[in-house]
Image (spheres, helix red, strand yellow):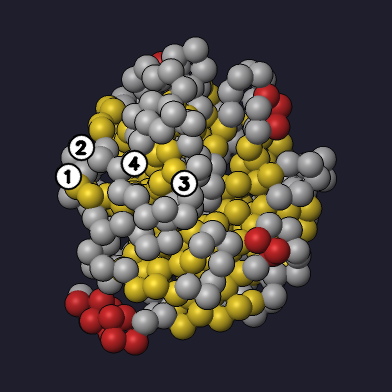
Amino acid sequence: TATLAQSATKQGPTLTPQASGTTARLIGVHAVNQNVAWVSGVGGTFAVTTDGGATWHPGVVPGAEALEFRDVQGVSATEAYLLSIGTGSDSRIYHTTDGGASWDLQFQNEDPDAFYDCFAFWTPNRGFAYSDGVDGRFPVIRTTDGETWQDIGDNLPAAQAGEFAFASSGTCTAAQGGKRGWIGTGGLGDARIFATTDGGDTWTAYSTPIVQGAPEGASGIFTIDFRDPHRGILAGGDLVRETEVLPNVARTDDGGATWELATPFPFGTVFGLSYVSKSGLPAVFAVARGGVAWSPDEGDTWNELPDFLDFWAVSFANQHAGWMVGGGGRIVKISF
């Protein structure tokens, strides 16, 4: 199992720009497998590849032209979910089963103060979506059938004043295995992790040591990923001091109950990160607007790739097939 980390340390990744067919800023990406990946972005934009990124097929969801799709969950070459962000009715979830030819509106937020940031799925039909706190409560929703969404906010601890998440890459939530899930927050309050081990029935709040509580309400956790039920990594920063190298990376080996700081990400605030392998290895790839970097050792050391600017999100199917997306419709394939 050490071969990936060892070879990656010696050789580093191969990064291959691909033609997305759109100039819209891309903010979400989900690698389904080495052939299939979905991306999402502003202006109601999505795109899908079924040939490893050799060709991308972009589109715009009808009726969503003014929305920002900050998160995408690909299921297959034909099925995917999109989450748009924004206050009130701008927060929506769309679903396609025909490769994006048509989209069903599954959920449209009716609370003028709610703001849905990210979603995560355990299976094609089971997932949850996080909203910022409203009057001391998080109106988190969950689906168990892949069609309807129910409010489970009463299952979560109370929201602190000014506590919210960052929709920088659609990765303020993570799901692992069949029932474990996590939410990372920030804002005016503490940067906290909410964890569930029973599919969202109960949640526990845990503190983290990264930069938090900035008076502008712009600091905290932006992105989180887990490589097994116990070991995970989170990152974030402070949007007001976006390029400053602050305590912005932490990791856990007990399912999120306790966190220790790792080496700070060298380009400031991290917008998105992903484990490179789904087989439990510690290599991590992280992206920011100021540059991207990867770590062979879960954040002990970072190898900088400073020429790649304004990237927002990254996702891997395996060490041979990952993608990062960003401004101007840019897609870059990553392989180790």
Q: Give the x, y percent position of residue 191.
A: 35, 34
Q: Residue at x 43, y 38 (%)?
A: 219
Mark 1, residue position: 254
Q: Amino acid at mark 1?
A: Asp
Q: Quick check: 130 left or right of 284? A: right
Query: Can you identify the residue that label 3 sits on?
Result: 241
Task: From the image, tell me which residue sits under label 4.
Answer: 211
Residue 195 appears at what percent x and percent y?
30, 34
Which element is circle 4 on?
loop
- Give me the C-alpha separation between circle 4 and circle 2: 18 Å
Dot 1 and dot 2 residues touching (CB under 8 Å): yes
Q: Position of residue 320 (x, y in %)?
A: 43, 78
The tag earlier along the polypeptide, 4 or 3, is 4
Q: Which mark is residue 44?
A: none
Circle 4: residue type: Val
Q: Let me know if residue 182 appears in the view.
A: no
The reply to whether discs 3 and 2 touch (Cβ–Cβ < 8 Å) is no
Distance from disc 3 to disc 2, alpha carbons, whole Å, reads: 28 Å
Comes first in the chain, label 4 or label 2: 4
Q: Is residue 326 left or right of residue 43?
A: left
Question: Within the image, what quadrant is residue 294 found in?
Answer: bottom left
* Mark 4 or mark 2, whichever is nearer to me: 4
**Can you identify the residue that label 2 sits on?**
257
Quick one: label 1 or label 3, which is nearer the N terminus? Answer: 3
Instruction: Name the quadrant of the N terminus.
Output: bottom left
Spatial separation of the CA atoms under disc 4 and disc 3? 11 Å
Element type at mark 2 = loop
As helix, strand or loop, the secondary structure at mark 3 comes to loop
